[in-house]
Amino acid sequence: MSAQPDKKPSSADRAARAAERKAARAAAEDAAAAESLREIYDEIVSRAPEHDIDPTLARVQRVLELLGDPQHAFRSIHLTGTNGKSSTARMTERLVREHGLRTGLFTSPHLTSITERIQVDGEPLSPARFVEVFQDVAPYVGVADRESQEAGGPRLSFFEVLTVMAIAAFADAPVDVAVIEVGMGGEWDSTNVVDGEVAVITPVGIDHERWLGSTLAEIAETKAGIIKERATAVSAVQNPVVDEILRERAAAVSAHLLREEIDLDVAGRRVAVGGQLLDLRTPAGLYTEVFVPLHGEHQAHNALLALVATEQLMGGRALDGGVVETAFADVAVPGRLELVRSSPTVLVDAAHNPHGAQALVDALEEAFDLRTLVGVVGVMADKDVEGLLAVLEPALAHVVLTRNSSDRSADPEDVAEVAREIFGEDRVQVVERLDEAIQVATDLAERDDRVGVGTGRGVVVTGSVITVADTRVLLGRG
């Protein structure tokens, strides 16, 4: 019997094998990029952390000078305030992008990966691209580091390096418009090197007192520093002290100031499935029945600021209603009253001060039918723990105090001393590990639920962005 010749592979077989080889190469490249990203992250975090502030723009300005001043290569919208910055920034970016403009977005902090902080056209930089950007700017950062140290100063901080990277990435993309959130404050914040033709000021309250000052006036003075010469500023409703300072700053630099409840307002708001329907009045017109897939009255006001900021960027004209509806309907803000598990309901929210906690409590009452709600709270040691817990207390049947993965996380036993004064001994538990704290809270919610399995009970995890980030990873959302 003669041997049969080998059967030649079909075109489909060859295509499948080629696809397998391509996938294997891509996986290897992704693994290499992930390893490089870890190494770079370790290098960046070895620097002064973003909460350790040396208030100057000089180091970032020096690196950008060496890079050819890329901050002037794109238009920018700059945001500051105490609460609502990230949500407003995300909504603004989405509105601008829906107009066919290429966008950059710089926000902080991140929830899962540092790459989330720098986005181009709505997508975080890939690990490989993040590595490339760092390698591009590293030599110039090194020069500025050496010059600063020779003069007796520090190296660039963690946040300063990220600011330089964001600006370099946006100029290289290139983007048409960058939406940039301050790290802290405004006047001396690293991001204040950009030419913000529109400045957005969300509600200003007491926070970061160690660096910004202990009074509203001191904090407002710092935040007002992002309002540039002949720019437009869009402000939320503010405390009268803050409002006066913003008006004085705008007058001093010949900026045009638009103020909520005077030049713009939320004309109507109705709770809807998955979010809310808004009527928004701006200097250019009235937008009605706009769906925003976010919960809480505070998000309606954030949406208003984003809409007006985008109008001003586009020359002050009214925007196409269909474009506005499409953009808002596509907005997502992870970690802000986000549902991460059902039955029982588990929500996460990054509220970390009394103002944010009040917005959370109001939104929970309005949007969620939860008769039994247990809080899991992990806060940073430098926060107003008493103020935060006092606001949360009426909404919670119990509070489970824990810690997050940050070395700045408050000792839950210390927090418990304050919590017992507010909640009473029987409503406070301390559980060191976050995963165990979530389970204890779930058990408490189920035990106390008098409505029936799967209804009327829930857990909210809050107190810090880091606590929320850790929870999202634990529950498979990271």
Image: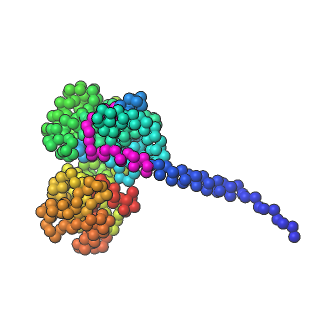
Report x, y in % for residue 56.
27, 35
Query: Is residue 472 part of the magenta span, yes or no?
Result: no
Q: Quadrant of the C terminus?
A: bottom left
Q: Report whether residue 308 is seen.
A: no
Which residue is farthest left? Answer: 421
Q: Is residue 173 left or right of residue 344?
A: right
Q: Report whether residue 276 is seen.
A: yes
Q: Nearer the viewer, residue 235 or 49?
A: 49
Query: Is residue 50 part of the magenta span, yes or no?
Result: yes
Q: Is residue 117 above or below residue 439?
A: above
Toward which corner of the image does residue 271 lie, by quadrant? bottom left
Report x, y in % for residue 152.
28, 35
Q: Is residue 250 above or below residue 337?
A: above
Toward which corner of the image does residue 427 lie, by quadrant? bottom left
Q: Is residue 229 left or right of residue 120?
A: left
User: At x 32% / y 65%, what residue is drawn?
Assistant: 435
User: At x 17% / y 30%, what residue is drawn?
Assistant: 248
Q: Nearer the viewer, residue 464 or 412?
A: 412
User: At x 43% / y 49%, what residue is drawn?
Assistant: 39
Magenta extent: 38-61
Toward which corner of the image does residue 122 lie, by quadrant? top left
User: At x 46% / y 40%, what residue is drawn?
Assistant: 135
Q: Is residue 109 above or below residue 365?
A: above
Q: Is residue 170 left or right of residue 363?
A: right
Q: Quadrant of the N terminus?
A: bottom right
Report x, y in % for residue 281.
26, 39
Report x, y in % for residue 13.
68, 58
